[in-house]
Image (tube, rainbow, N blue to C red):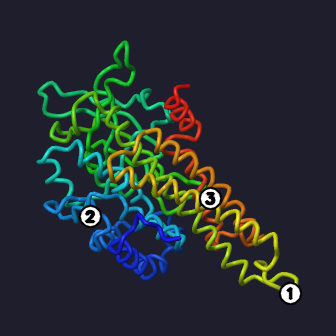
Amino acid sequence: MRRDIYNEDHDAFRETVRAFIESQIVPVYDEWLENGIVPRDFYLKVGELGLFGIEVPEEFGGAGIDSYKFEAVITEEMARAGVSLGGAAAHIPLCFPYLMKHANDEQKGRWLPGMASGELMWAIAMTEPGTGSDLAGMRTTAKLSEDGSHYVLNGAKTFITGGVNADRVIVCARTSAPSETDRRFGITLLVVDTKAEGYAVGRKLDKLGLRTSDTAELSFTDVKVPVEDLLGEENQGFYYLGQHLPRERLSIALSAYAQGAAAVRFAKEYTQERNVFGKPVASFQNTKFELAACKAKVDAMEAVVDRCLEAYDNHELTAADAASAKLFCTEAAADVIDRCLQLHGGYGYMNEYPIARLYADNRVNRIYGGTSEVMRSIIAKDMGL
């Protein structure tokens, strides 16, 4: 069945992305996996191809396309090939909307051209050690200097995607104490130059999956952040985060769907090529039934994702819609990938096979961007429960 959310422009773009992946990423991907990071200079190639600038306005060096569907194509093609762009998953999918909505014209002029070209890689730092999903409990502080020229940032963050390669980080910090009626009040967003004195990258975290993604611990010791790098208004950061969480959760749902579709592709190809008892594994009824069941789940995920992509482009995607999509797609993809790995037998447990890496990469989808438990709470609240 042809997906009607894409047109000829998307199809042509998909061909370009697929060719780039096959020629530029696949040959070096094992090296990236071994090193646990994408080489910083590679992002300049991605920027040169225009993959970072699709949504960036033309006056800042981008294509100015107000649609998430081209980003969706990139996600799908990366999963299809069993590769990723590592920490760049935070660059445009997560950080770009903050700049578009909350940066002033002068800030956009300073930051967006480098974002589009890959010269300035971005990350966002929310989570802190010991707080997890409780963002209102963050302890990182930013105090305005006596002369009002800069903030003094102190604290620590963890699980920061793209934290090693980042040139700029959107840091969530407390500029005021919580109010008596709202513990979310007082959080502010600051854009921090990673070369600033007192800014430090700690451990590059050793993760179960997403091995090419540079996930890091960050610390701030009396880091001076110019007031010109305040993003939006003081004390409104938590509400800004809430505005952009639907896009983040859509991106995770999309990734889960793409991983599930890739798993079915890998399992189908493997079982057609692998012989057991003198005939292909794909010829056995159990294999056919398992793959058919997995394909049906992938079709359902695709329908959910496509509906959400349309809603997002029409500025109609609600927090509950995104939570529902994330919950369903991440849970369904986990089942599909597990069953497809089983069809690989012992080889499915070997990292040289993409299904094994996919199994590990997929697991975090039910944790970051809000756990499955948090998604259920959001959906229940929307139901009036």
Marked residue nearer the N-terminal end (1 or 2): 2
Kindly identify which numbered label has been placed on residue 360: 3
Three-letter residue code for mark 2: Gly
User: Foreground: 92 or 70?
Assistant: 70
- CA gap, disc 3 and disc 1: 32 Å
39 or 243: which is nearer to us? 243
Mark 2 is surrounded, within 10 Å at the Cα level, by few (under 14), some (14 to 19) or many (20 or more) other residues, namely many
Q: Secondary structure at mark 2?
A: loop
Query: Of helix, strand and loop, which one carries label 1?
Result: loop
The residue located at (54%, 38%) in the rendering is: 375
Q: Residue at x 23, y 42 (%)?
A: 102
Q: Quadrant of residue 296?
A: bottom right
- Tell me the CA gap for discs 3 and 2: 30 Å
- Residue 278's mark? 1
Q: Position of residue 30 (x, y in %)?
A: 54, 74
Q: Residues within 10 Å of mark 1 (few under 14, many from 20)?
A: few
* Residue on which disc 2 sits: 53
Mark closest to the chain's N terminus, 3 or 1: 1
Distance Cα–Cα, label 1 vs label 2: 52 Å
Under mark 1, the amino acid is: Gly
Dot in front, 3 or 1 = 1
- Whether residue 130 sits left or right of residue 97 in the image: it is right
Percent x, y of residue 63 = 22, 66
